[in-house]
């Protein structure tokens, strides 16, 4: 049985946001939803939710969610329990408590992210980047990809059973 929860992890700039926006487009998750602090794009027909606030700003996606978004996850999961897939990414969900409780398929996008950070003009400190690199390095992935394009292709295929 496939995991209905998918978590995408990787350090800043590896393409997680691009991947999520590509999934929104590919699966036509154009309607916006909200359960307490959790914001997401959805396709009700296919039962797919892409969690995060994708609004075109420099830091979007899960970075736009409240730091305490995890306090709303139980209600979100309950209200969306009929969905086929929930896709999460980033720092807000890259912790042992989330992974243990919701048992997502963990997909890690490898790379140093330097090119992506430069492209968007990111000014994250070396200390912040080192912290995230360590945290991501400590996450056990179910599958790893060299880049976000390969990860997107895999996830698109993985979820293609609902379209």
Image: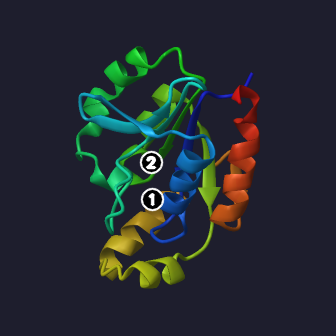
Is 37 left or right of 114, judged from the image as shown? Answer: left
Where is 127 relative to 9, above or below? below
Quarter holding the N terminus is top right
Q: Is residue 112 visible?
A: yes
Q: Residue at x 75, y 29 (%)?
A: 161
Disc 1 and disc 2: Cα gap in Å?
8 Å
Q: Which element type, helix, strand or loop, lies under badge 1?
A: helix
Q: Residue at x 54, y 43 (%)?
A: 7
Labels 1 and 2: the sequence-earlier one: 2
Q: Residue at x 56, y 24 (%)?
A: 47
Is 100 left or right of 131, judged from the image as shown? Answer: right
Q: Are marks 1 and 2 in contact (CB under 8 Å)?
A: yes
Q: Which element type, helix, strand or loop, lies under badge 2?
A: loop
Where is 12 relative to 37, above or below? below
Res. 45 image quadrant: top right
Position in image of residue 121 (x %, y %): 36, 83
Q: What residue is disc 1 on?
A: 135
Position in image of residue 62 (x %, y %): 37, 50
Res. 78 image quadrant: top left
Is 85 left or right of 51, judged from the image as shown? Answer: right
């Amino acid at each position: 049985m496939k995991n209905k929860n998918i978590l995408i992890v990787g350090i800043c700039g590896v393409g997680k946001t691009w991947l999520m926006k590509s999934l929104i487009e590919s699966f036509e998750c154009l309607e916006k939803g909200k359960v307490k602090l959790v914001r997401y794009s959805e396709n009700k027909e296919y039962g797919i939710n892409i969690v995060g606030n994708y609004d075109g700003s420099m830091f979007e996606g899960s970075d736009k969610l409240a730091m305490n978004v995890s306090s709303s996850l139980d209600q979100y999961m309950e209200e969306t329990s009929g969905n086929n897939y929930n896709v999460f990414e980033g720092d807000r969900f890259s912790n042992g408590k989330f992974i243990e409780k919701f048992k997502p398929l963990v997909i890690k996008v490898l790379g140093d992210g330097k090119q992506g950070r430069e492209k968007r003009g990111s000014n994250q400190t070396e200390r912040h980047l080192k912290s995230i690199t360590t945290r991501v390095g400590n996450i056990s992935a179910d599958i790893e990809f060299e880049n976000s394009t390969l990860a997107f292709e895999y996830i698109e295929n993985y979820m293609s059973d609902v379209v």
